[in-house]
Amino acid sequence: MNLDLRTIKEPRASVRRDFSGASFSRDADDQYRVRDTVTLDLDVRKDGGKVRLVGRLDAALELGCCRCLEPFPWGVGVDVDLLYLPASDNTGAGEVRIEESDLRTAYYRDDQIDLGQLMEEQFQLALPMKPLCRTDCRGLCVVCGGNRNTTACQCVARWDDPRLAVLKDLLSQ
Ligand SMILES: [Zn+2]
Ligand SMILES: [Zn+2]
């Protein structure tokens, strides 16, 4: 998943890469899974050792709902604007001057930009704080643990008391 800068001879080039969902290795406790093809569409601008990547990242991810714990599809489409500097510039006493100081800056070494790491970071930034399978997800029954979106368990009736509705909301979050 590297972008080999030696293959880019021009100061400006377009790079489009597709990655299959399977090429992203995920652990069971990760916050998301990659379901489908991920498309990275980048405009590469080289200026000496400085490399700016501007473009777009589109992916179909799968998140776990924070209320009912069920997996659900979640699409990501984010604009990317990153500045990469050679890692050697980041060591030693000299300070790197970056005019575009508002840009997010990362480092590369051996002429390789790690696109896998780039995408993981963008996904992490895009993830919702509280992933919900749907805005009105009813969550799990606090009594029997059943999924209240799909199961009408008997315990539900006990929560119909409006005075307990506030408590119910708290517990289902
Ligand atoms: Zn849910
Ligand atoms: Zn129940």
Image (cartoon, rainbow, N blue to C red):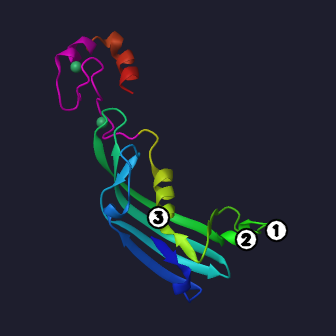
Residue topped by disc 2: 89
- Dominant SS in magenta: loop
Residue topped by disc 1: 94
Q: Please say if the residues under marks 3 and 2 sit with CB atoms less than 8 Å apart.
A: no
* Type of amino acid at the residue the image marks with label 2: Asp
Q: Residues within 10 Å of mark 1 (few under 14, many from 20)?
A: few
Q: Please say if the residues under marks 1 and 2 sit with CB atoms less than 8 Å apart.
A: yes
Q: Position of residue 74 (x, y in %)?
A: 34, 51
Q: Residue at x 34, y 42 (%)?
A: 64
Residue topped by disc 3: 116
> In the rendered view, would you say 20 is above or below 43?
above
* Type of amino acid at the residue the image marks with label 1: Gly
**Tag count in the figure?**
3
Q: Position of residue 17 (x, y in %)?
A: 40, 74
Mark 3 residue element = helix
Which is more toward the observer, 17 or 26?
26
Q: Quarter-wise, where is residue 6 in the image? A: bottom right
| Mark 1 or mark 2, earlier in chain | 2
> In the rendered view, would you say 10 is above or below 66?
below
Q: CA distance from mark 1 to mark 2?
A: 8 Å
* Type of amino acid at the residue the image marks with label 3: Gly
Query: Which portion, as a residue range, is magenta?
Result: 131-159
Q: Position of residue 100 (x, y in %)?
A: 69, 68
